[in-house]
Amino acid sequence: MKNLVKLYIAILFLAAYRPAEVVFEDTLCIENISTIDPEAGLIENQTVIIKSGKIYKVFSSNEIRLAKNNKIIDGTGKYLIPGLWDAHVHFAYIEDLAPSMFALFLSYGITSVRDTGGEIEFVKSLKEKAMNNPTDAPRVMIAGPLLDGISNVYDGSDNNHPPLSVRLASLEEVAKYVNKLDSIGVDFLKAYEMLSLEQFIMIAQMAKEKGLKVTGHIPLSMDVISASNAGLSSMEHMRNLELSCASNADELLKQRREILTTGEGDPGSLLRLLIYQDQREVAIQNYDKNKANEILQVLAKNQTWQIPTLVLSTASSEKYFTYPEWQESFKYLPDSIGQQWKKNTDAMKDGKVTPFRQQYSRWLFDMVKKIHQADIDIMAGTDCPIFYMTPGYSLHQELIMLVEAGLSPLDALKTATLNPAKYFNLENELGSIQENKWADLVILDANPLEDIRNTQRINAVIKQGKYYDRKKIDQLLAHLSEK
């Protein structure tokens, strides 16, 4: 009898401390889900409440009981990560593909993108479209066109070099154009390879005065340390880093400047190719570990971020785009583009990879590991849709490459979530699963910390509170494949 009394008292005690049922009006509630914080890692058994496009509340599921009349998503066995970024895209590279890119990005969990070069009115129109439809499009940050020198590379001379850049022949033109872009409202600037030393320094100085970051390739007229010290905020593709890491870097720089002077006025794409052919292999063969370490120390000190785009830079040797699952993504492209990509990539399957191309790819992987170990911030980007990089899909391959280069799965996720938010000073709005941040989120069916490939196992995408379940995502993709 005493035992029954004790049991009854225990039941009353538990009932008294059981949380009361709660109703959250006009919300979406995800309960019993494991969240992944880009810094802290896995947090199990969470309930996330979304309201008015933002993360309203985050609870331990043991602390709250949701009434049945809430709109509830059962997150049992699932994982919630912040929405992903692709930090290097080009909407203007294939203008006929651009109308499909919003749906492709969202379908693959990319809720924000950083457009790193395109005709200003074109990319501005896409940014405005995204801003006017924030639940149906990724967030779009734009640089406007590549700021290039007299022999500008992307001058519209052929299909591989559409008009993504502006030709700046003088310091006066630099000042005028930077002021124009600032007045239009770009989010950052993109400096390119044919700029003179003086032009680059002016761009960096003006950007600093206007509160803009400068990303880009290291101009061929400069070395990495000079560009970083001048104010380069971030480097794309680690482009031309190898030229400064060579034991004969000073000699190579002198040669480049002579070529640029004598070739002034020649097509920029051919002039750049000539320099690459003359110097890239020589630089890799003369790689100097001490010089590289010196450069990495400067990049770390100056906080010159890196966007390695390994998936692009190693594609010639690794040929990811020949994988059946990669080519499967081509069906979501406009027919003429998808068919041409399939034809071109099929033709490349059996192509010979030169020993240097293999060596260069290994160097790139090794350098990403060194960059990470030097505590230089990294952002994940792909350069899509250049070189058969399917928008959305290719970002997941980049995350795989970053892990293969030596990052942990959590660090790789950070490059595509919190880091881009920090880059744009948006870490109080995006990048992690915290109250009052925008509800840009992805629900996964498997743990990406166990295998980074699990970022592809998308169960649902949430864009500023709008819930795209798997059925709706498949409908988006089916609509693209029917075009």
Image (cartoon, rainbow, N blue to C red):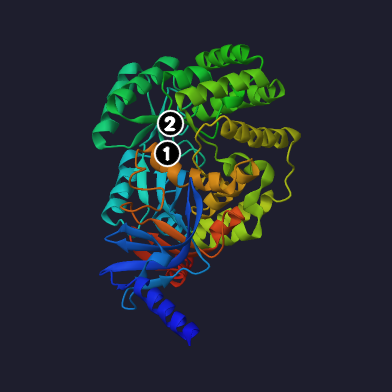
User: Whole-Å distance between the Cαs marked 1 and 2?
Assistant: 8 Å
Using the rendered view, name the quadrant where residue 289 is placed. Answer: top right
Q: Residues within 10 Å of mark 2 (few under 14, many from 20)?
A: many
Q: Quadrant of the C terminus?
A: bottom left
Residue at 37 percent across and 43 percent down: it is 427
Q: Residue 387 at what x, y percent from top left?
A: 56, 45
Q: Is residue 438 left or right of residue 238?
A: left
Residue 44 lies, with reference to residue 181, above or below; the image says below
Q: Nearer the viewer, residue 467 or 310?
A: 467
Instruction: Assess whether mark 2 and mark 1 are in contact (beta carbons under 8 angstroms).
Output: yes
Q: Image quadrant of residue 61?
A: bottom left
Residue drawn at 40 percent across, 37 percent down: 423
- For residue 116, the mark is 1
Question: Crowding at label 1, few (<14), some or many (≥20) Cα neighbours within 10 Å?
Answer: many
In this rendering, does residue 100 appear at all?
no
Q: Amino acid at mark 2?
A: Thr
Decide if residue 11 is in sight here: yes
Q: Position of residue 266 (x, y in %)?
A: 50, 23
Vertical side of 436 occupied by 278: above or below: above
Give the number of marks.
2
Measuring from the top left, give residue 191's x and y in whole percent.
Answer: 42, 28
Task: Look at the numbered disc 2 and give the secondary structure of its residue.
Answer: strand
Which residue is drawn at the image coordinates 45% and 80% (left, top)? Answer: 6
Which disc number belongs to residue 215? 2
**Mark earlier in primary sequence (1, 2):** 1
Residue 463 coordinates in the image, percent (x, y): 36, 59
